[in-house]
Image: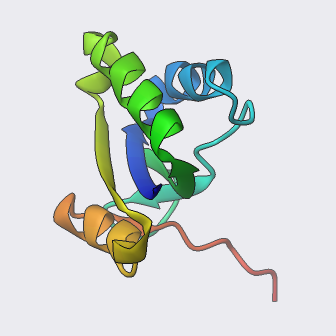
Amino acid sequence: MKYSIAMMVSAEALGAANALCAAHGWGEESFLVPLSPTGDAPATHFGLRASADAAFAADLAEAIATEPALSAQMVVDMREDSERQGQFDGLIAQAGLRRVQPEVDP
């Protein structure tokens, strides 16, 4: 079974969250979506959404649970991959956050 994993982390804990994900086989920079309450920079949080197999999802959930200081600064939503529609947008909306829009030069 495949799982959809949506996560967000505070900017202060970004390095630790990326290190945890990298230690479990994801890239060194997994949280690539900048977020803030207004949608303007600077980002206060960063997020991601990815699909993974059940074993990876379970290992990641266990790793997060063993890091209480980090997990206190993270929001994690794991569900069946078939239920991923709107998952990330719902997660950030519940937190009162928006995607930071890149500045566009005129």
Q: Position of residue 80 (x, y in %)?
A: 35, 63
Q: Nearer the viewer, residue 82 or 95?
A: 82
- Residue pushed farthest bottom? 106
Q: Position of residue 67 (x, y in %)?
A: 34, 11
Q: Position of residue 22 (x, y in %)?
A: 67, 25
**Count of all numbered marks drawn on residues in the image:** 0
- Residue 91: quarter of image: bottom left
Q: Nearer the viewer, residue 93 or 60?
A: 60
**What's the residue at 25%, 13% (across, down)?**
68
Can residue 44 be seen from the camera position used here?
no
Can residue 2 be seen from the camera position used here?
yes
**What's the residue at 36%, 79% (across, down)?**
86
Please say if 31 is above or below 11: below
Scheme by which the image is coloured: rainbow
Please say if 94 is above or below 84: above
Please say if 17 is above or below 74: above
Left-right relation of 52 to 94? right
- Residue pushed farthest front? 1
Q: Quadrant of the C terminus?
A: bottom right
Left-right relation of 86 to 22? left
**What's the residue at 31%, 61% (across, down)?**
37
Q: Position of residue 42 (x, y in %)?
A: 51, 51
**What's the residue at 52%, 18% (across, down)?**
16
- Residue pushed farthest left? 94
